[in-house]
Image (cartoon, rainbow, N blue to C red):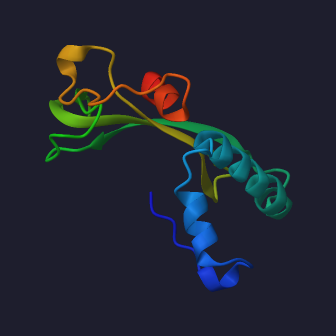
Amino acid sequence: MQIHIQLNAVPFAKDIFYRFMNSCHIHWPRFITLLAATIIQSTIAPLTNANRINVLILDDSIYHRARSKRVELLTRLYDHAKKECSYGFRMLTLCHSDSNTLLPVSLTLMSTENWKHRLCASSEKVDALTSGGKGRKFA
């Protein structure tokens, strides 16, 4: 996911923005969910007609990484739409829609617990109490 932001439109220097984006101390799933909730409540809800139906959409797609070989937790998956196996991750996305706008609320890349299907295991031991360790366990 790429974020395109005009850095001259925000009241702080671009170094602060880049340090924030690269911080390992930010709990990104929670941040993205809170940001989406704020956008829905402050921007989308006031512009939406009360008769319009709001829905949550849960999408289970495959994020293909066919040419990758050394990506951590890369796994072999069966794509039911193409009826074939490929390498990649299962991308689970939760979105909010009012039938006019679609806003991602939460997303995660998932691997498999079966070590036989993994192409590349974790190369180093990661502390299970860190956000990186918790993310790997969740995946």
The quadrant of the picture occupied by the C terminus is top left
Residue 48, above or below 15: above
Q: Residue at x 16, y 30 (%)?
A: 85
**Quarter of the rendering containing residue 81:** top left
Q: Position of residue 63 (x, y in %)?
A: 32, 42
Q: Position of residue 20 (x, y in %)?
A: 61, 59
Q: Position of residue 45 (x, y in %)?
A: 81, 56
Q: Position of residue 24 (x, y in %)?
A: 54, 46
Left or right position of 106 against 44: left
- Counting every numbered tag in the picture gives 0
Q: Residue at x 51, y 26 (%)?
A: 134
**Front one among 105 and 135:** 135
Left or right position of 84 against 131: left
**Front one among 83 and 108:** 108
**Front one among 134 and 35:** 134
The answer to whether any part of residue 37 appears in the image is yes
